[in-house]
């Protein structure tokens, strides 16, 4: 039986606070994860540690939760959501970030609200208005422009391919938010995350175990271990839980709109530490993407409380 979710003001404030916290963690992750790859760990080695660590944490947490029976049809949805939200999402993110720059990656991820709207149209049959369609076109033009014209050199080894991978990452994450929404309505977020990362680990194991066995962990310094810990515990366990907790009270479109904070934080930190530079291409692409996201995300009255 489905749970009845109360959308009280207090619950909505908690949901908004949760998604803000998740996006702050994600915003810092661009720079932190970039510092690990590829010298200390290959992207897929990080993915193995991240998914395995999250699965262990969520299973241990599940010991303290009441036993819940998952409907058979929901197991299928969990398996599909895990492929897009964990396997494809994380492989494309880390492989893409390894090839591009933190600023490029964070800007492209801002297309997620646009992609969520498109996914919701086909999966949840949400209507796309003319103004939202115009916003979709603007956002995609900005993303395509950045993917094709992103600067070469610096921290990025193959900007075009890295940007393309990040765009695939944003697309898969957008579909994940749409697929996971009904499950957050029916089950405890910790239960959902336990199964999402269990299926996710099954998917990533074959493509990542080789990189783990090739890694020499004895040469990794303490500061890099702290970065790895951040990626595994905060970016994966804490951020995923906060993000998906918010979906109990917020729509996928509202949830994804908070991704605007990521490029701002990633850019400020990267520039202040001298880890990246801002080009005219990135500024112009940002204007197109942010304009498109603004048009797509313009809410109707009281839209924030819809599920």
Image (cartoon, rainbow, N blue to C red):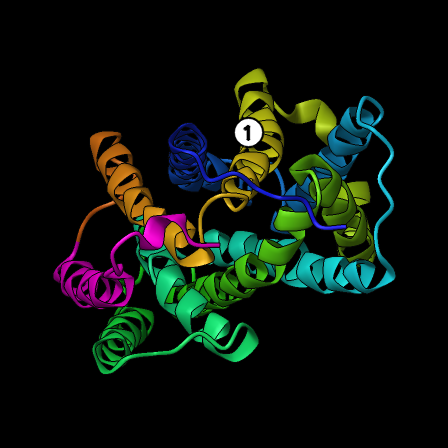
Residue 235: tell me if it is visible: yes
Where is residue 250? Give x, y as percent.
Answer: 44, 47
Which of the two residues, 167 or 196, is positioned nearer the viewer here? 196
Image height check: is 117 above or below 260?
below
Going by the image, does 74 lie left or right of 169? right
Q: Within the magenta stretch, is there residue 78?
A: no
Which residue is disc 1 drawn over?
234
Residue at image x 58%, y 55%? Answer: 181
Q: Name the residue at 24% across, 42% down.
A: 264
Nearest the viewer among 271 and 128 is: 128
- Along the horizontal axis of the image, is 80 left or right of 105? right
Compared to residue 99, the image places residue 250 above or below, namely: above
Residue 54 is situated, as x and y percent measured from the top left of the image, at: 71, 35
Q: Is residue 215 visible?
A: no
What secondary structure is found at the residue carrying circle 1?
helix
Report the magenta residues as a range. Answer: 279-307
Q: Main secondary structure of the magenta part?
A: helix
- Look at 40% across and 58% down and name the residue there: 253
Circle 1 crowding by C-alpha within 10 Å: few under 14, some 14–19, many from 20: some
224 to 153, vertically: above or below: above
Q: Residue furthest top?
A: 222
């Amino acid at each position: 039986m489905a749970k009845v979710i109360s959308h009280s003001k207090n619950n909505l404030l908690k949901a908004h606070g949760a998604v803000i916290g998740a996006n702050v963690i994600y915003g810092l992750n661009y720079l932190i994860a970039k510092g690990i790859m590829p010298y200390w760990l290959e992207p897929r080695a990080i993915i193995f540690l991240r998914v395995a660590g999250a699965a262990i944490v969520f299973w241990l947490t599940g010991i303290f939760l009441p036993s819940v029976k998952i409907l058979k049809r929901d197991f299928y949805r969990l398996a599909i959501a895990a492929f897009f939200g964990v396997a494809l999402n994380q492989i494309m993110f880390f492989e893409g970030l390894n090839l591009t720059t933190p600023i490029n990656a964070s800007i492209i991820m801002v297309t997620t609200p646009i992609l969520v709207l498109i996914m919701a149209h086909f999966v949840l049959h949400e209507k796309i208005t003319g103004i939202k369609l115009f916003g979709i076109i603007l956002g995609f033009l900005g993303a395509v422009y950045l993917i094709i014209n992103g600067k070469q050199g610096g921290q990025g080894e193959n900007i075009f391919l890295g940007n393309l991978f990040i765009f695939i990452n944003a697309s898969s994450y957008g579909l994940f938010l749409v697929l996971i929404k009904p499950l957050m309505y029916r089950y405890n977020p910790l239960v959902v995350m336990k199964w999402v990362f269990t299926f996710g680990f099954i998917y990533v194991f074959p493509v990542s175990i080789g990189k783990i066995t090739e890694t020499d962990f004895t040469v990794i310094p303490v500061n890099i271990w702290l970065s790895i810990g951040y990626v595994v515990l905060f970016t994966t366990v804490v951020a995923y839980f906060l993000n998906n907790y918010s979906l109990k009270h917020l729509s996928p479109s509202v949830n994804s709109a908070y991704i605007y904070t990521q490029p701002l934080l990633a850019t400020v930190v990267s520039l202040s530490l001298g880890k990246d530079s801002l080009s005219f291409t990135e500024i112009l692409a940002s204007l197109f993407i942010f304009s498109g996201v603004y048009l797509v995300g313009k809410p109707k009255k009281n839209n924030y409380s819809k599920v």
